[in-house]
Amino acid sequence: MRKAWVWILGVIALAAVAGVLWWREGPAAVIVVAPTRGPAIDAIYATGTVEPTVMLPIAPRVAARLVELNVDEASQVRKGQVLARLDDADLISTVEELEARARYAQSQHERIENLVRQGFMAKAESDRTRADMDAATAAVKRARSQRDYMALTAPADGLIIRRDGERGQFIPAGQAVFYLSCCAPLRVTAEVDEEDISRVHIGQKVVLRADALPGEVLDGSVTEVTPKGDPIARSYRVRVALAEPSRFKVGMTVDANLIVAERANALLVPATAVQGNALWTMSDGRLHRQTVRVGVTGSGRTEILEGLAPDACVVDSPAADLREGHRVRIAQPPSGGKKK
Protein backbone atom coordinates (compact mmCIF):
# COMPACT_ATOMS: atom_id res chain seq x y z
CA MET A 1 0.00 0.00 0.00
CA ARG A 2 2.84 2.34 0.90
CA LYS A 3 4.55 1.61 -2.43
CA ALA A 4 1.36 2.52 -4.28
CA TRP A 5 1.22 5.90 -2.59
CA VAL A 6 4.89 6.54 -3.33
CA TRP A 7 4.26 5.67 -6.97
CA ILE A 8 1.24 8.02 -7.12
CA LEU A 9 3.16 10.89 -5.52
CA GLY A 10 6.02 10.34 -7.94
CA VAL A 11 3.68 10.54 -10.92
CA ILE A 12 2.22 13.76 -9.54
CA ALA A 13 5.70 15.25 -9.04
CA LEU A 14 6.74 14.30 -12.55
CA ALA A 15 3.55 15.84 -13.93
CA ALA A 16 4.24 19.02 -12.01
CA VAL A 17 7.81 19.17 -13.30
CA ALA A 18 6.59 18.51 -16.81
CA GLY A 19 4.01 21.28 -16.44
CA VAL A 20 6.67 23.73 -15.29
CA LEU A 21 8.94 22.74 -18.15
CA TRP A 22 6.08 23.07 -20.60
CA TRP A 23 5.25 26.47 -19.19
CA ARG A 24 8.87 27.56 -19.43
CA GLU A 25 9.83 25.90 -22.69
CA GLY A 26 6.52 25.33 -24.46
CA PRO A 27 5.56 27.60 -27.37
CA ALA A 28 4.09 30.97 -26.33
CA ALA A 29 1.24 32.48 -28.30
CA VAL A 30 2.15 35.74 -30.11
CA ILE A 31 0.62 37.96 -32.74
CA VAL A 32 2.88 38.70 -35.66
CA VAL A 33 2.63 41.29 -38.41
CA ALA A 34 4.59 42.00 -41.54
CA PRO A 35 6.30 45.37 -42.09
CA THR A 36 4.58 47.61 -44.62
CA ARG A 37 5.70 50.35 -46.95
CA GLY A 38 4.17 53.80 -46.79
CA PRO A 39 4.77 57.48 -46.09
CA ALA A 40 6.60 58.44 -42.92
CA ILE A 41 5.96 62.01 -41.85
CA ASP A 42 7.79 63.79 -39.05
CA ALA A 43 5.55 66.68 -38.05
CA ILE A 44 5.16 69.22 -35.26
CA TYR A 45 1.61 69.43 -33.96
CA ALA A 46 0.06 72.76 -33.02
CA THR A 47 -3.38 74.29 -32.62
CA GLY A 48 -4.28 77.61 -34.20
CA THR A 49 -7.00 80.07 -35.11
CA VAL A 50 -7.95 81.59 -38.46
CA GLU A 51 -7.63 85.37 -38.34
CA PRO A 52 -7.33 88.34 -40.71
CA THR A 53 -3.83 89.27 -41.76
CA VAL A 54 -4.85 92.92 -41.29
CA MET A 55 -7.73 93.86 -38.98
CA LEU A 56 -8.51 97.57 -38.61
CA PRO A 57 -10.75 98.94 -35.85
CA ILE A 58 -12.95 101.84 -37.01
CA ALA A 59 -13.83 104.19 -34.16
CA PRO A 60 -15.03 107.82 -33.75
CA ARG A 61 -12.57 110.47 -32.60
CA VAL A 62 -15.23 112.24 -30.53
CA ALA A 63 -17.98 110.86 -28.33
CA ALA A 64 -21.49 111.01 -29.77
CA ARG A 65 -24.70 109.08 -30.31
CA LEU A 66 -24.90 106.63 -33.22
CA VAL A 67 -27.73 107.71 -35.53
CA GLU A 68 -27.09 105.86 -38.81
CA LEU A 69 -25.81 102.38 -39.73
CA ASN A 70 -25.21 101.67 -43.40
CA VAL A 71 -23.44 98.28 -43.26
CA ASP A 72 -23.41 95.19 -41.09
CA GLU A 73 -21.17 92.20 -40.41
CA ALA A 74 -20.11 90.31 -43.57
CA SER A 75 -20.56 93.45 -45.72
CA GLN A 76 -17.99 94.05 -48.43
CA VAL A 77 -17.04 97.75 -48.42
CA ARG A 78 -14.98 100.10 -50.55
CA LYS A 79 -12.40 102.62 -49.45
CA GLY A 80 -14.07 105.90 -48.43
CA GLN A 81 -17.54 104.37 -48.14
CA VAL A 82 -19.61 105.83 -45.28
CA LEU A 83 -20.29 103.00 -42.84
CA ALA A 84 -22.14 104.90 -40.12
CA ARG A 85 -22.87 108.40 -38.85
CA LEU A 86 -22.94 109.85 -35.39
CA ASP A 87 -25.10 112.73 -34.20
CA ASP A 88 -23.46 115.90 -35.57
CA ALA A 89 -26.24 118.46 -35.06
CA ASP A 90 -24.21 120.48 -32.54
CA LEU A 91 -21.16 120.44 -34.78
CA ILE A 92 -23.19 121.59 -37.80
CA SER A 93 -24.38 124.58 -35.79
CA THR A 94 -20.83 125.26 -34.63
CA VAL A 95 -19.53 125.16 -38.20
CA GLU A 96 -22.23 127.56 -39.38
CA GLU A 97 -21.43 129.97 -36.54
CA LEU A 98 -17.70 129.89 -37.21
CA GLU A 99 -18.23 130.32 -40.95
CA ALA A 100 -20.25 133.46 -40.24
CA ARG A 101 -17.48 134.79 -38.02
CA ALA A 102 -14.90 133.97 -40.69
CA ARG A 103 -16.90 135.89 -43.32
CA TYR A 104 -17.20 138.89 -41.00
CA ALA A 105 -13.45 138.78 -40.24
CA GLN A 106 -12.67 138.68 -43.95
CA SER A 107 -14.94 141.67 -44.71
CA GLN A 108 -13.38 143.64 -41.86
CA HIS A 109 -9.90 142.90 -43.15
CA GLU A 110 -10.82 143.95 -46.71
CA ARG A 111 -12.31 147.24 -45.41
CA ILE A 112 -9.24 148.04 -43.30
CA GLU A 113 -6.98 147.17 -46.23
CA ASN A 114 -8.73 149.77 -48.38
CA LEU A 115 -8.35 152.39 -45.66
CA VAL A 116 -4.65 151.58 -45.24
CA ARG A 117 -4.06 151.94 -48.99
CA GLN A 118 -5.76 155.35 -48.87
CA GLY A 119 -3.57 156.38 -45.95
CA PHE A 120 -6.38 156.75 -43.43
CA MET A 121 -5.18 153.94 -41.12
CA ALA A 122 -1.85 152.50 -39.99
CA LYS A 123 -0.47 149.25 -41.40
CA ALA A 124 -0.70 147.67 -37.95
CA GLU A 125 -4.49 147.70 -38.16
CA SER A 126 -4.35 145.74 -41.39
CA ASP A 127 -2.05 143.18 -39.78
CA ARG A 128 -4.43 142.81 -36.83
CA THR A 129 -7.48 142.19 -38.99
CA ARG A 130 -5.53 139.74 -41.14
CA ALA A 131 -4.64 137.76 -37.99
CA ASP A 132 -8.31 137.78 -36.93
CA MET A 133 -9.31 136.52 -40.37
CA ASP A 134 -6.70 133.74 -40.35
CA ALA A 135 -7.76 132.62 -36.87
CA ALA A 136 -11.43 132.51 -37.89
CA THR A 137 -10.57 130.50 -41.02
CA ALA A 138 -8.54 128.00 -38.97
CA ALA A 139 -11.42 127.62 -36.51
CA VAL A 140 -13.76 126.80 -39.40
CA LYS A 141 -11.38 124.14 -40.74
CA ARG A 142 -11.06 122.55 -37.30
CA ALA A 143 -14.84 122.48 -36.80
CA ARG A 144 -15.39 121.02 -40.27
CA SER A 145 -12.86 118.28 -39.54
CA GLN A 146 -14.64 117.43 -36.30
CA ARG A 147 -17.94 117.34 -38.18
CA ASP A 148 -16.45 115.03 -40.80
CA TYR A 149 -15.23 112.69 -38.05
CA MET A 150 -18.88 111.96 -37.27
CA ALA A 151 -19.05 109.94 -40.49
CA LEU A 152 -17.21 106.63 -40.05
CA THR A 153 -15.67 105.67 -43.40
CA ALA A 154 -13.81 102.59 -44.61
CA PRO A 155 -10.04 103.21 -44.68
CA ALA A 156 -9.59 100.49 -47.34
CA ASP A 157 -11.46 97.92 -49.38
CA GLY A 158 -12.36 94.95 -47.22
CA LEU A 159 -14.87 92.91 -45.24
CA ILE A 160 -16.68 94.00 -42.07
CA ILE A 161 -16.10 91.10 -39.68
CA ARG A 162 -17.55 92.65 -36.52
CA ARG A 163 -19.95 95.42 -35.52
CA ASP A 164 -20.23 96.74 -31.96
CA GLY A 165 -22.91 99.40 -31.91
CA GLU A 166 -26.64 100.00 -32.36
CA ARG A 167 -28.62 103.03 -33.49
CA GLY A 168 -29.22 105.35 -30.56
CA GLN A 169 -26.26 104.01 -28.60
CA PHE A 170 -23.78 106.52 -27.16
CA ILE A 171 -20.31 105.71 -28.47
CA PRO A 172 -17.30 106.97 -26.47
CA ALA A 173 -14.35 108.42 -28.36
CA GLY A 174 -11.96 105.69 -29.50
CA GLN A 175 -14.40 102.81 -29.04
CA ALA A 176 -14.48 100.70 -32.21
CA VAL A 177 -17.83 100.39 -33.93
CA PHE A 178 -16.55 98.19 -36.78
CA TYR A 179 -13.62 95.85 -37.39
CA LEU A 180 -12.46 95.67 -40.99
CA SER A 181 -10.53 92.75 -42.48
CA CYS A 182 -8.58 94.03 -45.43
CA CYS A 183 -5.49 94.25 -47.55
CA ALA A 184 -4.45 90.57 -47.40
CA PRO A 185 -6.02 87.06 -47.26
CA LEU A 186 -6.78 85.19 -44.06
CA ARG A 187 -4.02 83.38 -42.19
CA VAL A 188 -3.62 80.98 -39.26
CA THR A 189 -1.87 81.88 -36.04
CA ALA A 190 -0.66 78.75 -34.22
CA GLU A 191 1.09 78.21 -30.91
CA VAL A 192 4.14 75.93 -31.14
CA ASP A 193 5.76 74.44 -28.05
CA GLU A 194 9.17 75.90 -27.25
CA GLU A 195 10.74 72.42 -27.43
CA ASP A 196 9.85 72.24 -31.14
CA ILE A 197 10.39 75.83 -32.26
CA SER A 198 14.00 75.19 -33.34
CA ARG A 199 12.64 72.87 -36.07
CA VAL A 200 10.31 75.50 -37.52
CA HIS A 201 11.46 77.69 -40.42
CA ILE A 202 10.00 80.11 -42.95
CA GLY A 203 8.47 78.38 -45.97
CA GLN A 204 7.88 75.10 -44.10
CA LYS A 205 4.92 73.06 -45.38
CA VAL A 206 1.90 72.87 -43.08
CA VAL A 207 -1.07 70.48 -43.25
CA LEU A 208 -4.28 71.85 -41.75
CA ARG A 209 -7.51 70.27 -40.53
CA ALA A 210 -10.55 72.01 -39.09
CA ASP A 211 -13.59 70.58 -37.29
CA ALA A 212 -15.69 72.99 -39.34
CA LEU A 213 -14.41 71.30 -42.53
CA PRO A 214 -14.70 67.57 -41.74
CA GLY A 215 -12.73 65.23 -43.95
CA GLU A 216 -10.77 68.01 -45.63
CA VAL A 217 -6.99 68.38 -45.53
CA LEU A 218 -5.72 71.79 -46.61
CA ASP A 219 -2.22 73.13 -47.21
CA GLY A 220 -0.35 76.11 -45.87
CA SER A 221 3.17 77.37 -45.30
CA VAL A 222 4.99 79.13 -42.47
CA THR A 223 5.43 82.83 -43.15
CA GLU A 224 6.49 84.21 -39.78
CA VAL A 225 7.85 83.05 -36.41
CA THR A 226 7.61 85.55 -33.58
CA PRO A 227 11.04 86.19 -32.02
CA LYS A 228 9.71 86.35 -28.44
CA GLY A 229 7.90 83.44 -26.85
CA ASP A 230 5.28 83.31 -24.13
CA PRO A 231 7.11 82.33 -20.90
CA ILE A 232 3.86 81.22 -19.24
CA ALA A 233 2.47 79.06 -22.04
CA ARG A 234 6.05 78.09 -23.05
CA SER A 235 5.19 78.53 -26.71
CA TYR A 236 5.97 80.66 -29.76
CA ARG A 237 3.48 82.18 -32.18
CA VAL A 238 3.77 80.98 -35.78
CA ARG A 239 1.91 82.55 -38.73
CA VAL A 240 0.73 80.26 -41.52
CA ALA A 241 -0.33 81.42 -45.00
CA LEU A 242 -3.28 79.49 -46.44
CA ALA A 243 -3.22 77.96 -49.91
CA GLU A 244 -7.03 78.27 -50.08
CA PRO A 245 -8.02 81.09 -47.72
CA SER A 246 -11.55 81.21 -49.13
CA ARG A 247 -12.26 77.82 -47.52
CA PHE A 248 -11.90 79.29 -44.02
CA LYS A 249 -13.77 81.80 -41.93
CA VAL A 250 -12.40 84.13 -39.28
CA GLY A 251 -12.32 82.49 -35.85
CA MET A 252 -12.17 78.85 -36.96
CA THR A 253 -9.91 76.63 -34.87
CA VAL A 254 -7.54 74.35 -36.77
CA ASP A 255 -5.10 71.54 -36.12
CA ALA A 256 -1.80 72.32 -37.79
CA ASN A 257 0.94 69.80 -38.58
CA LEU A 258 4.21 71.48 -39.53
CA ILE A 259 6.07 69.01 -41.74
CA VAL A 260 9.70 68.53 -40.70
CA ALA A 261 10.52 65.50 -42.88
CA GLU A 262 8.58 63.29 -45.26
CA ARG A 263 9.63 59.98 -46.84
CA ALA A 264 7.32 58.29 -49.32
CA ASN A 265 8.44 54.63 -49.20
CA ALA A 266 9.41 54.05 -45.58
CA LEU A 267 9.49 50.66 -43.83
CA LEU A 268 6.79 50.77 -41.14
CA VAL A 269 5.78 48.56 -38.21
CA PRO A 270 3.13 49.07 -35.54
CA ALA A 271 4.34 51.45 -32.85
CA THR A 272 3.31 48.85 -30.24
CA ALA A 273 5.92 46.43 -31.63
CA VAL A 274 8.90 48.65 -30.82
CA GLN A 275 10.50 48.64 -27.38
CA GLY A 276 13.08 51.40 -27.23
CA ASN A 277 15.52 50.58 -30.01
CA ALA A 278 14.56 46.94 -30.43
CA LEU A 279 11.73 44.63 -31.43
CA TRP A 280 11.03 40.89 -31.53
CA THR A 281 10.83 38.85 -34.72
CA MET A 282 9.77 35.23 -35.26
CA SER A 283 11.76 32.86 -37.46
CA ASP A 284 11.37 29.07 -37.67
CA GLY A 285 9.00 29.15 -34.72
CA ARG A 286 11.45 30.90 -32.37
CA LEU A 287 11.87 34.43 -31.08
CA HIS A 288 14.78 36.71 -31.90
CA ARG A 289 15.41 40.15 -30.42
CA GLN A 290 16.33 42.57 -33.19
CA THR A 291 18.10 45.88 -32.56
CA VAL A 292 16.86 48.54 -34.99
CA ARG A 293 17.31 52.23 -35.77
CA VAL A 294 13.99 53.98 -35.37
CA GLY A 295 12.85 56.94 -37.48
CA VAL A 296 9.55 58.78 -37.34
CA THR A 297 6.77 57.65 -35.01
CA GLY A 298 3.21 58.74 -35.61
CA SER A 299 -0.36 57.67 -36.43
CA GLY A 300 0.22 54.28 -34.79
CA ARG A 301 3.18 53.42 -37.03
CA THR A 302 6.93 53.62 -36.47
CA GLU A 303 9.51 53.95 -39.21
CA ILE A 304 12.43 51.51 -39.15
CA LEU A 305 15.54 52.92 -40.78
CA GLU A 306 17.96 50.02 -40.21
CA GLY A 307 18.08 46.53 -38.75
CA LEU A 308 14.90 44.92 -40.08
CA ALA A 309 14.30 42.85 -43.22
CA PRO A 310 11.22 43.85 -45.24
CA ASP A 311 9.89 40.27 -45.12
CA ALA A 312 10.39 39.74 -41.38
CA CYS A 313 7.59 38.57 -39.07
CA VAL A 314 7.39 41.14 -36.28
CA VAL A 315 5.79 40.43 -32.91
CA ASP A 316 3.09 42.97 -32.17
CA SER A 317 2.67 44.12 -28.55
CA PRO A 318 5.35 41.74 -27.17
CA ALA A 319 5.05 40.59 -23.54
CA ALA A 320 7.72 41.58 -21.05
CA ASP A 321 8.80 37.96 -20.36
CA LEU A 322 9.80 37.00 -23.91
CA ARG A 323 13.22 35.34 -24.22
CA GLU A 324 15.68 34.94 -27.05
CA GLY A 325 15.17 31.61 -28.83
CA HIS A 326 11.89 30.85 -27.07
CA ARG A 327 9.54 28.68 -29.15
CA VAL A 328 6.35 30.47 -30.13
CA ARG A 329 3.16 29.88 -32.05
CA ILE A 330 1.00 32.38 -33.87
CA ALA A 331 -2.10 33.29 -31.90
CA GLN A 332 -3.97 34.45 -34.99
CA PRO A 333 -3.11 34.89 -38.67
CA PRO A 334 -1.05 38.04 -39.17
CA SER A 335 -2.81 40.82 -41.01
CA GLY A 336 -1.07 41.06 -44.37
CA GLY A 337 1.82 38.93 -43.12
CA LYS A 338 2.84 35.28 -43.29
CA LYS A 339 3.57 32.56 -40.79
CA LYS A 340 7.03 31.19 -40.32
Image (cartoon, rainbow, N blue to C red):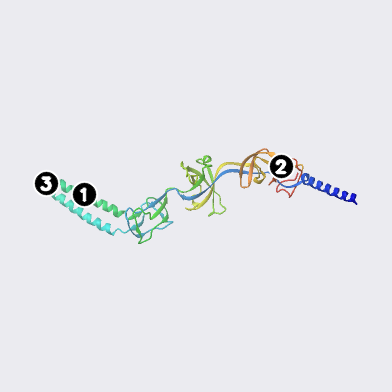
Mark found first going from the N terminus, 2 or 3 = 3
Q: In this view, does 293 lie above or below 137?
A: above
Question: Relative to 119, is 147 on the left or the right?
Answer: right
Residue at coordinates 29% horizontally, 55% vertically from top-left? 147
Give how far across and how far down residue 26 sits, in percent.
78, 45
Q: Is mark 1 on a helix, strand or loop?
A: helix
Distance between mark 2 and mark 1 Cα atoms? 96 Å
Whether label 1 touches label 3, CB < 8 Å: no
Which amino acid type is shown beneath numbered disc 2?
Thr
The answer to which of 189 and 3 lies nearer the viewer is 3
Give the labeled residue for mark 1.
135
Give the labeled residue for mark 2.
281
Q: Which mark is residue 116?
A: 3
Quadrant assignment for the C terminus: top right
Which amino acid type is shown beneath numbered disc 1?
Ala
**Is label 1 or label 3 in front?**
1
Residue at coordinates 13% horizontally, 45% vertically from top-left? 124
Give how far across and how far down residue 262 sits, in percent.
59, 42
Q: What element carries label 3?
A: helix
